[in-house]
Amino acid sequence: MARITLKVTPNAKRNEILGWETAEKAGGPGVLRVKLRVPPVEGKANREVVAFLAECLGLPKSAVVLTHGEKSRSKVVDIAGLEDAEVRVRLTAIDSGPRDG
């Protein structure tokens, strides 16, 4: 199972992966910056980030679980069925292309 930290920006024009930022702690895996087109109201952004990541990774939505940050722009998700390195490779490959999810 993979675990990644996200920095989410809601109310964007489109869903988009912006790329990886280096972690504040040396040796950390980094933070994935994601833009979402939905507002952060009534859990819409949380549902959208799960669906968007699942689509980007080619996994069912049930494989992506929000574990921390329900009311924050900083979120942590667990991804079943993939290891950290594979998640990073898949998301890095698409980090420059917008997707409408």
Image (cartoon, rainbow, N blue to C red):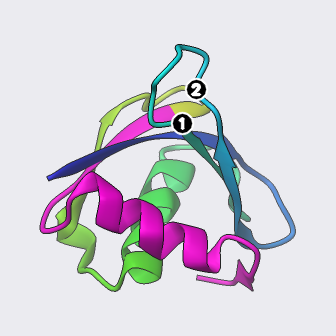
The magenta region covers 75-101
**How packed is label 1: few (under 14 Cα within 10 Å), some, or many (20 or more)?**
some
| Front residue of this view, candidates 74 and 45 | 74
| Residue in front for this viewpoint, 34 or 101 | 34
Where does the image place residue 40, in percent across and percent down from the top left? 64, 43
- 48 relative to 27, above or below: below
Give the vertical position of 54 relative to 99 (above or below): above
Q: Residue furthest front?
A: 27
Give the percent coordinates (x, y) of residue 8.
Answer: 64, 44
The quarter holding residue 86 reads bottom left
Magenta region includes residue 16: no
Marks 2 and 1, how far apart at CA = 4 Å
Viewed as shown, does residue 21 lie left or right of 59?
A: right
For numbered disc 2, what is the local secondary structure?
A: loop
- Residue at the outermost top position: 25
**Residue shown at 87% from the left, 69% from the top:** 13
Q: Quadrant of residue 89?
A: bottom left
Report the disc number at residue 100: none
Q: Is residue 74 above or below residue 62?
A: above
Q: Are marks 2 and 1 in contact (CB under 8 Å)?
A: yes
Q: Which residue is mark 1?
A: 30
Please, what is the three-letter code of the amino acid marked with disc 1?
Gly
Q: Residue at x 47, y 49 (%)?
A: 46
Instruction: Residue 53: name its quadrant.
Output: bottom left
Within-10-Å neighbours for mark 2: few <14, some 14–19, many 20+: few
Q: Residue at x 61, y 17 (%)?
A: 24
Residue linked to disc 2: 23
Image quadrant where one finds the C terminus: bottom right
